[in-house]
Image (spheres, rainbow, N blue to C red):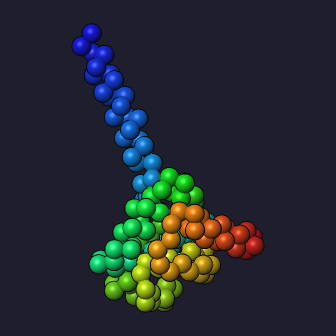
């Protein structure tokens, strides 16, 4: 009988722990690594340019990008976060405002540029627009 409470507790950890990780995203930290992975898998990229002091970047990640619906849609993308002040790339323009998100092809073509904070519904529309453009490239 002592095992029953332990089983319930373990089951709760598994169920609720999985729910907490559902919206967790894997972010690359290096732009070139992200491009290499995108090319190898033939997947588009989502490049998020942020800064260490940007409260809207934090809100965008926590409220929008980690939403289960958005996180599920982003599974088909290679995700990379880069600091605006540290990035030096000819493929990603300097972002005056953060957060700025670039949806890109593996061949480094920018399909969409999203600047500022967006909620789940609005960001979903940006993903829709990007995916339409990706379809047109095929």
Number of numbered discs present? 0
Which image quarter is the C terminus in? bottom right
Locate residue 111: give its quadrant: bottom right
Which image quarter is the N terminus in? top left
Q: Position of residue 136 (x, y in %)?
A: 75, 73
24 or 79, which lies in front?
24
Residue, x 38% and y 38% (percent of image)? 16
Q: Is residue 7 above or below residue 21?
A: above
Q: Is residue 98 above or below residue 79?
A: below
Apparent side of residue 102 relative to residue 4 in the rendered image (left or right):
right
Q: Position of residue 73 (x, y in %)?
A: 57, 58
Q: Position of residue 62 (x, y in %)?
A: 40, 62
Residue, x 41% and y 65% (percent of image)? 61
Residue, x 60% and y 74% (percent of image)? 105
Residue at the left extreme of this rendering: 2
Residue, x 56% and y 74% (percent of image)? 103
Asked whether the viewer can see residue 33, the reply is: no
Q: Position of residue 11 (x, y in %)?
A: 37, 28
Asked whether the viewer can see residue 51, the reply is: yes
């Amino acid at each position: 009988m002592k095992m029953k409470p332990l089983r319930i507790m373990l089951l709760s950890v598994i169920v609720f722990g999985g729910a907490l990780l559902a919206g967790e995203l894997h972010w690359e930290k290096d732009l070139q690594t992200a491009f290499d992975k995108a090319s190898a898998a033939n997947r588009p990229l989502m490049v998020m340019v942020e800064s260490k002091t940007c409260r809207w970047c934090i809100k965008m990640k926590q409220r929008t990008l980690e939403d289960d619906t958005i996180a599920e849609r982003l599974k088909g993308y290679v995700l990379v976060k880069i600091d605006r002040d540290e990035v030096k790339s000819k493929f990603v323009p300097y972002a005056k405002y953060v957060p700025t998100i670039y949806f890109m092809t593996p061949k480094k073509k920018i399909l969409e540029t999203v600047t500022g904070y967006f909620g789940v519904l609005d960001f979903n529309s940006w993903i829709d627009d990007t995916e339409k453009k990706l379809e047109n490239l095929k």
